[in-house]
Amino acid sequence: MPLVSRIEIVKKSKQPVISIKTKTKMENLPIVIGETYGKIQEYLKEIGEYPEDIPFVRYFNMDMENLEVEIGIPVYKELPGKNDIEFRYIEEMKAVYGLYQGPYQEMGETYDEIMMWIEDNRMKPTGIFLESYYNSLEDVSEDKLLTRILMPLD
């Protein structure tokens, strides 16, 4: 499935988030993401707070055996953390944006297309990738999954 938007540069404001940073193997990532979102959503419910935007995963490397990720949910304000759930900010950024529709395991071609666009436009990515998820398999079929991809620039 394809990129369903133009590739373009966006500027994102500093964003408060509640999240968990962890390391995992790529094969375990779907389970880790599901468990982590559940834990964070339960915590938000416990303290009477609500998400400000859609859930995200920020990838700090692409080592498939030892992925370093931050899994979280944007919030409106600073919140107390609890155990491994921490409040932090995603810093203001200039990033290349694309919207992908389809199964998560088929996103590689879209990433390649975005990286080629970055290269063609002589830009330098930071090496961090941010995916935000508009829906899930609980809501729609795989071919209807919508994922916002941001690649921050230096």
Image (spheres, helix red, strand yellow):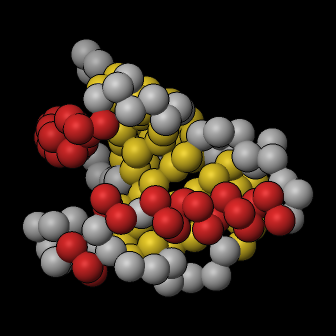
Left or right of 138 on screen, residue 60:
right
Q: Residue reaching furthest right?
A: 122
Q: Position of residue 133 (x, y in %)?
A: 35, 62
Residue 77 visible somewhere in the drawing: no
Q: Residue reaching furthest top?
A: 83
Q: Which residue does the image show at 56% across and 82% down from the upper left?
A: 5
**Closer to the camera, 35 or 108?**
108
Left or right of 136 on screen, residue 138:
left
Q: Position of residue 1 (x, y in %)?
A: 38, 79
Rendered position, 71 above or below 83? below
Q: Position of residue 15 (x, y in %)?
A: 56, 47
Rendered position, 47 above or below 24? below
Residue 65 visible somewhere in the drawing: yes
Rendered position, 50 above or below 121? above
Q: Position of residue 24 (x, y in %)?
A: 30, 26
Q: Which residue does the image show at 29% across and 29% down from the upper left?
A: 25
**Closer to the camera, 93 or 142?**
142
Q: Which residue does the image show at 28% across and 68% down from the upper left?
A: 103
**Closer to the camera, 100 or 16?**
100
